Amino acid sequence: MHKGSNPVKQAHLLPLPLRQVDRTYVLSGGRKLIYFAGCDYFRLSSHPAIIRALQKGVKSTGISVSASRKTTGNHPFFDELERALARFFKSPAAVLIGTGYMTNLVVAQALAGRFTHALIDQRAHPSLQDAAAFLGCAVISFRHQDPAHVAQILSRLGRGAVPLLLTDGVFAHDGSIAPIGEYLKTLPAKGIILLDDAHAAGVLGKNGRGTVEQLKLSPERIIRTVTLSKAFGVYGGAILCDESIRELVLTRSRMFTGHTPMPLPLAQAALASVRLLERDHALRQRLVKNTGVVKSELRKAGLQLPETPAPIIGYVPKAGDEVAKLRATLLKAGIHPPLIDYPGGPEHGYFRFVLSSEHTMPQITKLVHSIKSALAIR
């Protein structure tokens, strides 16, 4: 810490610590509160089968390979998990990466110099924004979810342009889905999409394969990146691609070459999680039901919400007093107030409510009633 810095002020740069308990609750400020936040959509991070796999992994393999996969760290569990992810997402290949955030950076390093322009949604996840800098080409921002603006930009670039379009599949602030099909129609034949599907993987689509399955698209011109820390409840990330892109990642990305992969027990836990989501369709059915109930009730009361099946509900307060009222109402009802205050976000922050498959109907009813009461909607 620099001389003269204030540790109390530094602590305020982060929200108050939370401890998740009993799968749908957190301990905060000495209180046990219902938790409608985070991205553990199926609460697999506390699922008994996933915990057992993790514990078994610790005993059988230790914690880390302590080396890059390009040297002596390519454990068989990593290959097995990649095959399982490729099978789950119906992808020709998968490449396991140490964190979800890194996946986009690794892809960009692998593709550097192969595109003339990078077109990126102005609200794209920071990992995509950081990745664009590795591509070695001009980076152009387009209006949020606006295929017409993409078409205008492409028309100015000329016939020789080879663009890469970067976008989230599901946007975390409100759960809206990118118009991927429209982008594919607009892009030239050599143009492809880098799709960060972190919030859709495991959640959207009949089988949980994400945005591409939800929109009934072919993944042929799409490189997908996913995280294992949200729907899968574990840690790490993966790139879903064809064999040619996999080869580029393995041979051209210094970040892939130089990083130590995810801890082995987490790889085994992730493998158990993938297998669980493959066979237990009731998890997604409960999530769909819970999401539908909350969104339907709030829409009936007059709240404007994007037409999306994603289990995310964002609300931007109109003023500071509305923040205080909604926060107080939620706390009175025993609900943790999920106020998000990202740099560059709305002035007063925004509330992001996230549904899970494990929330009970009484909990959901309490959430709906509290929001309606605080916002004076019926």
Image (tube, rainbow, N blue to C red):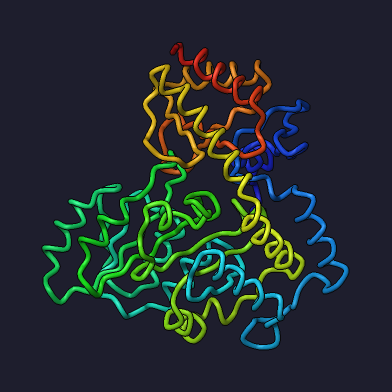
Q: Is residue 130 above or below residue 137?
A: above
Q: Is residue 186 above or below residue 359?
A: below
Q: Is residue 113 above or below residue 105?
A: below
Give the quadrant of residue 176: top left
Q: Tag count in the figure?
A: 0
Task: Pinpoint residue 173: horizontal percent, then vertical percent.
Answer: 44, 41
In-image side of 372 versus 150 (left or right) = right
Give the quadrant of residue 150: bottom left
| Closer to us: 15 or 283 | 283
Q: Residue at x 26, y 58 (%)?
A: 183
Q: Residue at x 61, y 33 (%)?
A: 36
Q: Residue at x 61, y 76 (%)?
A: 259
In-image side of 64 versus 220 (left or right) = right
Location of the C terminus (image quadrant)? top left
Q: Residue at x 78, y 27 (%)?
A: 30
Task: Pinpoint residue 278: horizontal percent, then vertical percent.
Answer: 62, 58
Q: Is residue 277 above or below residue 292?
A: below
Task: Pinpoint residue 83: horizontal percent, then vertical percent.
Answer: 60, 74
Task: Pinpoint residue 237: horizontal percent, then vertical percent.
Answer: 57, 64
